Every structure is written in C-alpha cells, then in structure tokens.
Image: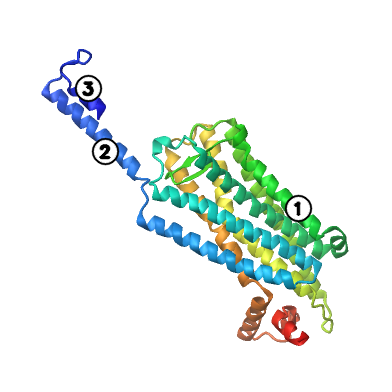
Amino acid sequence: MLALSHYNSSASPLFPRFTNDSVGKVESRVAVEGLLQQENFTSVQPTTSGIIVVVLSMTLGIISNIVALFILANAYSLQRRRSKATFLLFATSLVVTDFIGHVIPGALVLRLYLHGGVRPENFNSSDGMCQFLGGSMVFFGLCPLFMGCAMAAERCLGVTKPLLHSSLVTKTRTKICLSVIWMAALCVAMLPCFHLGSYTYQDPGTWCFINVLTDTKEVDVAFVVLFSGLGLTSLAVALVCNTISGLTLVLARLRRQPGSHHSAKSHDIEMVVQLVGIMVTSCICWSPLLIFGLMSVIRSYTGSVGDDLSNYKTLMVMGVRLATWNQILDPWVYILLRRTVLRKIYLIAKCQVGLRGNVLGRWEPTSFPSSEKKEVNQV
C-alpha cells in the first residue's frame, strides 16, 4: 500500500522517524484496516448457492409466464363474450408485463452477482445500470398493482351493473386504459431523472432501489411515499371491488331458484376467483416491501434509524425477495384457477364431504361447465 511505504520511508523529511515499536503498531493497524475492508468487500461476494437461487427463480418465472400466456392467448382467441374477452385482454397484458419484469431485472441482478456486487463504500453512487435497474423495479412493480386494481374495478362493474358495463367497457377503451397504466408507471419510475428522488445500490450490493436508508432528503421521502401510497391504494381498491363482486355473486346464487339455470354466471365466478387469487398474491408479495420502504425512509430521514440500520437492511432484502415472487406466482393463478380445474376441485370436495341436498347443492357442477365438453357438443 502507498500509505505503508510513506510510513517506512526514513529519507522523507515530511514524516518523523519511527522506532521499531511504533512501526510495528502502524503495520498492525494498517493490516487490521485492510482485513476489515476485505471483509466488507467479501460480504457482498456472490455464493454459488445464491447464483443457483437466482437462476432457478428466473427459470421458474419464465416457464410459468409462458405457460400462462399460452393458456390465456388460446382462451382469448376462442372467447366470444365481450366481458370475458376484456378480462382476458387485461390478464394477458398482466402476464406479459410480469414476464418482461421478471426477465430484465433478473438478468441485471444476475450480472451483478457474477461480477461480485458493489463495494459497500459505493452504495451511494448511482451509475447508469443502477438507474435502469431501480427504474425497472418501480415500473414493473406498479404495473401489476395498477392492472390488478383496474381488473377488479372492471369485474365489479360487470357483476353489479352489467348493462352499464356493456355500454362503457369495450376493447378499445380497455387498450387505452392499459396504455394509461403503463404511462403512469413509467412517469413515476422516471422521476429520479428529474432529480425528484434517487436510486442507489442496496445491501448486499446486488440490486438497486429508491434511496431509503442513507442520506435521505425530502425528495426521497416524497418519492417513497408516492410509490408506496400508489401501491397500497391499488391493493385497497382491489380488495373492496373484489369483496363487492364476491358477495354479489354469492347472494345471487343463494337467491336463485333450484330449477333455474344461468350458465353465463360461471364466467363471472371464474373471473372473480382469479381476481381474488391475484389480489391475495399481490398483497402477500408486495405489502412487505411497500411498508418496509415507508418505515425505513421515515426513520432514516428523522435520524432515528440508529443501531437498527442492519435490521432495516434485512427487512428491505426480505421485502424485495417477496416482491420478485409475485411475477412467479401470478401466472399460476390462471393456470390453476380455471373453470375446468375449479370444477374438478368442486367434484372432489363434494365427494369427500358428501354434501347432498343442502344449500351447497346450489353450486352444482354445471356452475363450472367444461370448455372441452362444449366443444365436443358443438362438433
């Protein structure tokens, strides 16, 4: 080290002559500092298990989204009901967004892993890749939340006010709504480009996100409040809309006469069940990161984070890991919660429980007609 050579130089008039004891103390101090710096740097070095987890997560997410996209595209091409086609258009756009949002940030995180991450002293720096990675996480985080909220509101209108829904909701307006959602999420993600917030490397130096822990300013607090507020509001609106839709369908089933038959309601049941699955998945995966981000930036800005800094770093890492699972679990909502699967689950449950002739008998298997059976009858 350059500093060590200065201390050992006896010819230099700028430095006093040290005795052997003092030289030994200086060398020991420099060695200890070097070990500490090496320990800090190696703490962000990727492990083989970490890289394997990232690769397996990306592979599982890609396969899940491709399978769900194939199912939705096939269902959309065969669908004739406009309300169902609108829902499938929303769902397909959500799966495509999840797919892209899983591949792009995942590839950047894997690249950081393979290159050893970023040194702790460089966490506050923000290069071009950090800006892009942080913006991608904000954009692909808000888009699914906005889309889930829009889908829940659309289904709530379709279930409670079907005539108004048929006159207001069209494919063209649905595409406009999707464009507005993407543009709104993009505008929020690009705020740091106008110095309204900032993206920084986060512990352990393998991902970037909004600055919430170090040198936070008013704009950082406002940015986190905007991001978390929009996300939590979307989840709350989706919860209210899905609750209203579910209760409306349950009451309609209970009030239905035993001899009547409304097969069209099976589509509404399927869509609401899928929306509830999306909502539950989003709440579990995104709520921790949204809440931990708010807690961290407020404590950091008020200077009360103190000795709990390591705990907040751990919470943020746990939050972002849960958030990444949203893009993996969302496709399985469409894969598992289809009418054919729901019908089989209902039949199995009915055989196991042995309920016949009671109020649950109104939810007969024809509530979830099989699309394959309809196609055979048409042939």
| Marks 1/3: CA–CA distance | 66 Å
Camera-near label (3 vs 2) is: 3
Please say whether residue 284 is visible from this viewpoint: no
Q: Is residue 159 left or right of residue 198?
A: right
C-alpha span from label 1 to label 2: 56 Å
- Drawn side of residue 241 relative to residue 324, left or right: right
Q: Which residue is mark 2?
A: 35
Q: In the image, is 99 to the left or to the right of 245?
A: left
Label drawn at residue 6: 3
In 3D space, how far apart are the residues under numbered discs 3 and 2 (Cα atoms)? 20 Å
- Work out which quarter of the rendered image holds the C terminus and state it: bottom right
Amino acid type at image mark 3:
His
Disc sitting over residue 177 in the figure = 1
Tell me residue 48's x, y (percent).
36, 56
Question: Please, is residue 208 above or below residue 245 in the view?
Answer: above
Which label sits on residue 123?
none
Tell me: 24 left or right of 272: left
